[in-house]
Image (cartoon, grey):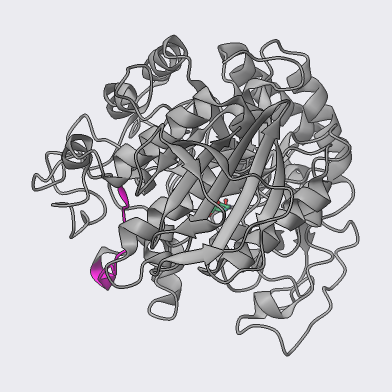
Amino acid sequence: MNSNSNFPWWKEAVIYQIYPRSFKDSNGDGIGDLQGVIEKLDYLAGTENSLGIDAIWFSPIYPSPMFDFGYDISDYENIDPIFGDMDTFKTLLKECHARNVKLIMDLVVNHTSHLHPWFVESRSSRDNPKRDWYIWKDGKKGKLPNNWVAAFGGSAWEWDEKTESYYYHAFTVEQPDLNWRNPEVKKAIFNMIQFWLDLGVDGFRLDVVNYYFKDAELRNNPRNFFKGLREYERQYHIYDRNRPETHDVLKEFRKLLDSYPGDRMSVGEVYQEPPGTAKLPASFCGNNDELHMAFNFTFLYTKWNPEAFAKVIEEQERELGDIIWPNYTLSNHDQPRHFSRYKKGKSGVQRAKIAAAMLLTLRGTPFLYYGEEIGMESEWIPKKYIQDPLGKRYWPLFVGRDRARQPMCWTNEEYAGFSKVEPWLPISKNKELINVMRQEQEPTSLLSFYKTLIHLRKKEIALRRGSLRLIIKDNPYILGYERIYESEKILVLLNFSDRERRFPPIPNLSLKGKILLSTHRAENTNYELGMIQLYPYEVNILKLE
Ligand code: NOJ
């Protein structure tokens, strides 16, 4: 892949998210680790048989008491011993780079762990120099500073007996929010970012980037009694997130990234459920002078319906325009896996192939989530195995996020080749069919299909750089779009239904070309039809003449 200034690597990359606890356990403690990832790097990239991804985003690997499994950091410049140490990390980085794979770190700087030395100091006395590094409000026990609630339940204010004050936490009580209004906090965070950039990491995923700043006067959020079940959903979050001050910090952050060679990148998580319009995330990219990308989570909530997907794509194209680069995600560590969301009867793999073909041929950076390439599912996890703090708190109303975090299935062995001992979360029940070893041998497996798609994307410049034109967007069965780059034209046709479907000729669209990839027809054969005809759940990608 040749990077050029219009197309830095992250625009052309396929990015793969690893949830480190669940990828590969190398030391037999039932929890995945960095050495495990190193052992599996060839699976991901660098050989002819690899999946072919270009970058890995690691969910947090820093020291953490794990109240939120790493999203509560107690030391920003180290590696948690569960995952390895700094030397293992450096080896990992070197091994990634040797395979031309970029490494993206998770940057969790809205909050720290309550055991971070900064917070330990901050809570120690009202006049401690680090007091103002967090958000404190002196008061009376029982008299909350305002009506803000934590995204993970309960009031966002926690009473601290020692100094008779409340501290603010947008998530769990073990995740106190940093005070971004304090210049010392910003300085410390920026120094830490430089530490990782100097080590050579290629980018950052910014956790809840829209939460950094809260209203300076701590005004109450207005309420809406008709929305949602939980108090959190019944508020308009106008004072506890999406504050304008964030943009200044992001501009500075962008300048810092740009001062390093090699196109260091950033992608922000703009947290709101459901995701809403494309406008809000895009606003955190500014005029392409803030974040490089902001996650587009809409597919995580899109029903199995080509018209609905077309609407999302259309909206992305319209709202992001030529300035902001789009991205698409089907699954991540917070949501049920898309295989389970979309499967119907025995059609799971067929639907997963349609979804993969769409994800990997749209205009924008695709983010894959470990295990989706073999069709891992989100299973019911019995209560006694639940680990996620959210699952523990809300079970059975909400079973939590563990079902998106089960160990990767490498083989059909007892512990799926993930570990030699019982892992931290149960192994998938369907590991016999859904495992890497088996699917590597089957040319029609989902894994083989992902590989073919990723390699096609690498080969065809129009799939990476081309503009996008939706061609069939109002049809209940078929989604069709063209990718156009200079004189190259690729047509993607996806039949979302279990029946054969036809579509009349489209004015100004010749259907003469070669099949680049189809789930039903031989590759490289000529295709010339008066009308579109697709087999049940067919993916058909054509290079037009
Ligand atoms: C968003 C992350 O994706 C989620 O896993 C985490 O629990 C919260 N931020 C808090 O850091």
In this picture, is 174 found above or below 261?
A: below
Query: Residue 405, position in %: x, y?
Result: 36, 52
Query: Residue 192, position in %: x, y?
Result: 65, 24
Taking the magenta stretch, the answer to whether it contains residue 333 is no
Foreground: 179 or 507? 507
Magenta-highlighted residues:
374-384
Foreground: 348 or 263? 348
- Who's the residue at 57% across and 19% down the image? 201
Q: Can you see residue 442? A: yes
Q: Quadrant of the C terminus?
A: top right
In this picture, is 188 found above or below 4?
A: below
Q: Residue lying farthest left?
A: 414
Q: Quadrant of the N terminus?
A: top right
For the image shown, how many numbered marks are present on the structure? 0
Q: In the rendered view, does 53 fall on the left or right side of 132?
A: left
Q: Can you see residue 170? A: no
- Who's the residue at 76% across and 75% down the image? 147
Quadrant location of residue 240?
bottom right
Foreground: 213 or 163? 213
Query: Residue 502, position in %: x, y?
Result: 51, 64
Quadrant location of residue 418?
top left
Q: In the rendered view, does 332 fall on the left or right side of 12?
A: left
Query: Residue 21, position in %: x, y?
Result: 34, 42
**Magenta part mainly helix, strand or loop?**
loop
Foreground: 19 or 491? 491
